[in-house]
Image: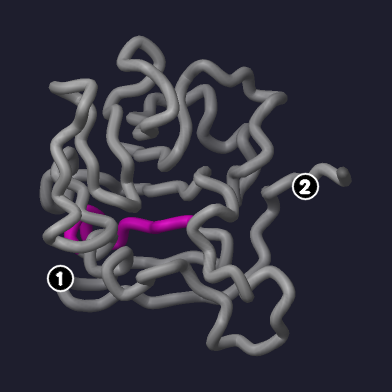
Amino acid sequence: MTTLILGHSRHYKKQQIRCSPIDVKLWYDKPFKCVDFLCDSATTDFVYDIYRSIDYRFDERGISYGDEGFWVWKFAEDESYDIIIDCIGSIYWDHRAKWSTNEEYKKYKNQDKLLETILRVLKINGKFYSYFGIYTKTNDKTLLFERKKLDGYKYIDY
C-alpha cells in the first residue's frame, strides 16, 4: 500500500493531528509519503504547494506551474498511490461549504482540477479520503463518490 498525506509533515505527533478526515491511528504508524510547503525537506517528502502548483523541492524560490492551473502535482507519477488522505484542513474548501446546507457548495476550490489530478495519481481501486467523503477510482476515467461524514477532523473552539 502506498499512501500520500496532503498538507502534512512528519513533524507532528499523532495526538497533535486534527485535520485528518479519518482516524489518525489508521495511517500514522504505517509507511506514507507526505507533501506540504510550510515545512522543510527534513520533515516532508515533497516540499510543494499542492493547490497553487509551486514546486519548492529544488529551489527555495520555487518553480511555478500555475500557468497550468490549480492542483497540478508534478511530484506525483500517474497511478502512484493506493490511498490519498486530505490533511490540508479547510483552507481549500469552498468558503461557503462549512455553513451551507446546499450540497453544491460542499466542495473544494477548483474541485474539477483536483479530481482530475486525483484520478491521474490514484491506482485503480484507490481511495481519496476528503472532508466531504470518499472518492474511489474504479477505472482510468471514473471516480465514484460516497458522501459521508468520516471519523476524523477534530475542531478546536476558539
Left or right of residue 72, residue 158 in this image:
right
> What is the x, y in percent for residue 35?
35, 34
Name, please, the residue furthest toward the top: 42
Q: Nearer the viewer, residue 45 or 47?
A: 47
Q: Mark 2 or 1, which is nearer the eye?
A: 2
Q: Quadrant of the N terminus?
A: top left
Q: Residue at x 30, y 51 (%)?
A: 52
Q: Above or below — where is 128 with respect to 57?
A: below
Q: Nearer the viewer, residue 54 or 6?
A: 54
> What is the x, y in percent for residue 142?
25, 77
Q: How far is the residue under mark 2 from the one under mark 1?
A: 35 Å
**At label 1, which amino acid type do we have?**
Asp
Q: Residue at x 33, y 30 (%)?
A: 33
> What is the x, y in percent for residue 144?
38, 77
What is the magenta segment's predominant secondary structure? strand
Residue 1 visible in the shown view: no
Q: Quadrant of the C terminus?
A: top right
Residue 76 visible in the shown view: yes
Q: Which mark is residue 155?
A: 2
The answer to which quarter of the image holds residue 68 is bottom left
Q: Is residue 80 magenta?
A: no
Tell me if mark 2 has few (under 14), some (14-19) or many (20+) residues whose alpha carbon lies within 10 angstroms of its own. few
What range of the chain is rendered magenta?
120-129
Name, please, the residue furthest toward the right: 157
Residue picked out by circle 1: 140
**At label 2, which amino acid type do we have?**
Tyr
Circle 2: element type: loop
Q: Nearer the viewer, residue 141 or 35?
A: 35
